Each structure stands twice: as structure tokens, then as C-alpha cells.
């Protein structure tokens, strides 16, 4: 079903309570807890825990005997749940009301249902982790070699990315993972030098292997490589925008990544002027009202940063305001 949270619609579950709650006294304060487990393979894998702060209903029981008739206590977006596997899953919802002072349980209930998970689960992704690491390294070498050569600083940045990929491994796993990742770096460095790496093929691999958060992570790796020498040229910026389109990245998120890792002050002037509208989210076909709303929002955001304590951020804000003002004038005249 569709649920609404803060005025925004999401696919999700609505957890309602029907029945009589018995507590020792009127106006009894309780803790409300909802635990959602995946029990498809008999072993329970917790996919979500919700407590008082997420409850839709008051956590004070008004009378010692209180009758509830389909009162909604929780609304849970499916995107917030961490499923182990993709496919048809059996879920168990465990709901409880307990005393805030001594955890005495006043009410508990369970409900099981089947749910089709459309996206890969964390165990699916974990099994593909070596493939994801290899394609991430491959894409960073494509970014590093897009101008024809791989600079020393770009190579060092790719090495740093390899170290980042190792951080989630346990001490027992790190030696084997390090050997594997170093192998990916060596082999893809050779392929980049000989021109054997292909942009579209690699992007298709990323789309087939990765969920949206992993795509954004790989995208940020590539931005870091582009920023490694302190200047982003046209080929690097164009490739970044091309990646964002083909990977179908979240537009707001990828613009934030651009601002953080590859700010306009790092881009060649001729480059950022040609791609500036796209960076702001002004795409062909959108209405003049939408354009004006984008420019108004961006002007307000950057105007708040012109007094930033960091000189680099001040410079970035000043440059953004100049270019936004030019666009406001341009679209006002149309």
C-alpha cells in the first residue's frame, strides 16, 4: 500500500492495532516496539526495528482497559527495510507495548505475511562484492585515463580508493581482499594504458551489479580521481555527467556529490560554463516556472555561504552566485 509521511507518498506497511489493551492504571506510559524479521529460510534476519520515536500514535494508554479499533501505530516505508535477499520473502511483524520503568509487557502480537522484494538484498550484494570492487576500480581508471594519460596523483587516488574498499573487511579477510584488489588495480592499469577499457560496457556492468547507493559510491570515487590533480578538464566533467545519466543516479544527490568533490572552482572556466545548467538540474524540456524555482533555490543556498569561514567555500559561493545571476537574467528575457 501507499503510506504518507510528512506529505510524501511511499510504498510501505501500515501497522494497526485492534483489540483490548490492559494496563495497571490510567494514563500509563508505555514503550512501543515493532520488530520486522525475514523468516523465509527459518532463520530470523531482522530487517527493521521501530520504537517510540517512529510511532504514529500516542504512547500513553489512557485507561486501564482501552479498546483499539484499527488504530495505526507505525507506517514503515519498504525502502527503509534491509532485506537479506531479493524475491518472495516471508516476513514476521512483532508488536509490543511494555512499561517504561520495568519493561513489563502489557501487550504483544505477531503477524506474518509474504512480500516481493524487487531490489537485491544485502546478502545478494555481499556475494557479488568482488565483482563490484573490480568494476569500481575499472571505472576509476576510465576516469583517470579519459584525457589520454593517467597522472601519478590520479594513480595514487585510485590506490586510496582501493584502501577504502578494504575498510569493511575483518582482519581475517583483509589479506586476501588486499591481494585481490591490488590485482584489480594492476590489471586495469594495464588495460587503461592499452585502451582496452570501454565506458558503456563498464557502465552496463555497474547497472547490472549495483544498487543505487553503490552506484553513487562508485560515482564519487570517479569524481575524486577527476579532482586529484586539482583541475577538472572538459573530458572528465563530461564523463561525470554521462555516468550520472546512464547510471540513473538520484539528481539531487549527484549534484551534492559534484558540489562537494568537484566544485566549480576546480573546473576549467570554459567547462563549467558549458555544463553549469546541467549541474543545477536545468534539463531540456522543463518549464520556465521550474527553471525559476531552481534558480531561486540555488541563489538562496549559495548566498548563505558567501560569508563562510573557509575561503575556498566563499570563492565557490561567489562564483556560483555570479553564474546563477546570469542565468536568471537570461531566462527573464525569454
Image: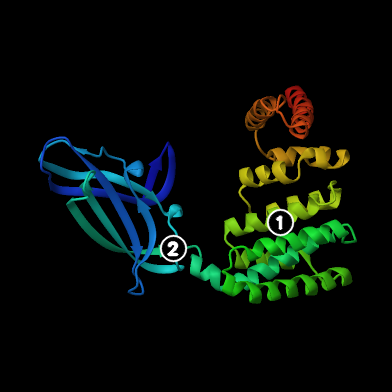
Disc 1 target residue: 221
| x, y percent for residue 321 | 75, 27
- Name the front one of labels 2 and 1: 1
Residue 319, relative to residue 25: is it above or below?
above
Q: Residue at x 55, y 68 (%)?
A: 125
Residue 113, relative to residue 240: is it above or below?
below
| x, y percent for residue 306 | 72, 25
| x, y percent for residue 325 | 76, 25
Q: Classify residue 323 as left or right of residue 179.
A: right
Disc 2 target residue: 83
Which one is nearer the viewer's eye here, 272 or 188?
188
Bin the neighbour count of mark 2 within 10 Å (Cα to Cα): few under 14, some 14-19, many 20 and up.
Answer: many
Task: Please give the label number shown on residue 311.
Answer: none
Which one is nearer the viewer's eye here, 191 or 70?
191
**Secondary structure category for the residue under label 1:** helix
Residues at badges 2 and 1 in contact (C-beta under 8 Å)? no
Amino acid at each position: 500500500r501507499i503510506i504518507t509521511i510528512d506529505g510524501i507518498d511511499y510504498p510501505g506497511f501500515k501497522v494497526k492495532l485492534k483489540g483490548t489493551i490492559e494496563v495497571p492504571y490510567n494514563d500509563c506510559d508505555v514503550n512501543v516496539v515493532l520488530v520486522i524479521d525475514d523468516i523465509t529460510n527459518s532463520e530470523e534476519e531482522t530487517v527493521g526495528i521501530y520504537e517510540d520515536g517512529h510511532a504514529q500514535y500516542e504512547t500513553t494508554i489512557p485507561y486501564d482497559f482501552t479498546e483499539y479499533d484499527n488504530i495505526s501505530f507505525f507506517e514503515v516505508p519498504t525502502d527503509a527495510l534491509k532485506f537479506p535477499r531479493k524475491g518472495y520473502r516471508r516476513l514476521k511483524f512483532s508488536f509490543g507495548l511494555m512499561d517504561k520503568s520495568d519493561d513489563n509487557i502489557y501487550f504483544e502480537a505477531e503477524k506474518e505475511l509474504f512480500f516481493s522484494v524487487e531490489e537485491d538484498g544485502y546478502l545478494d550484494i555481499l556475494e557479488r562484492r568482488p565483482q563490484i570492487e573490480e568494476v569500481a576500480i575499472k571505472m576509476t581508471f576510465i576516469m583517470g585515463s579519459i584525457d589520454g594519460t593517467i597522472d601519478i596523483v590520479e594513480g595514487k587516488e585510485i590506490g586510496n580508493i582501493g584502501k577504502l574498499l578494504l575498510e569493511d573487511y575483518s582482519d581475517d579477510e583483509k589479506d586476501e581482499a588486499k591481494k585481490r584488489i591490488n590485482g584489480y588495480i594492476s590489471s586495469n592499469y594495464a588495460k587503461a594504458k592499452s585502451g582496452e577499457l570501454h565506458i558503456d560496457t563498464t557502465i552496463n556492468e555497474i547497472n547490472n551489479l549495483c544498487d543505487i547507493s553503490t552506484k553513487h559510491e562508485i560515482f564519487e570515487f570517479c569524481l575524486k580521481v577527476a579532482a586529484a590533480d586539482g583541475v577538472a578538464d572538459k573530458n572528465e566533467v563530461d564523463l561525470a555527467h554521462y555516468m550520472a545519466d546512464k547510471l540513473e543516479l538520484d539528481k539531487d544527490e549527484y549534484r551534492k556529490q559534484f558540489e562537494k568533490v568537484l566544485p566549480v572552482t576546480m573546473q576549467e572556466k570554459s567547462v563549467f560554463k558549458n555544463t553549469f545548467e546541467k549541474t543545477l538540474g536545468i534539463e531540456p524540456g522543463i518549464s520556465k516556472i521550474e527553471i525559476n524555482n531552481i534558480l531561486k533555490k540555488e541563489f538562496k543556498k549559495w548566498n548563505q555561504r558567501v560569508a563562510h569561514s573557509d575561503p575556498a567555500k566563499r570563492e565557490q559561493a561567489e562564483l556560483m552566485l555570479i553564474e546563477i545571476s546570469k542565468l536568471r537574467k537570461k531566462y527573464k528575457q525569454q
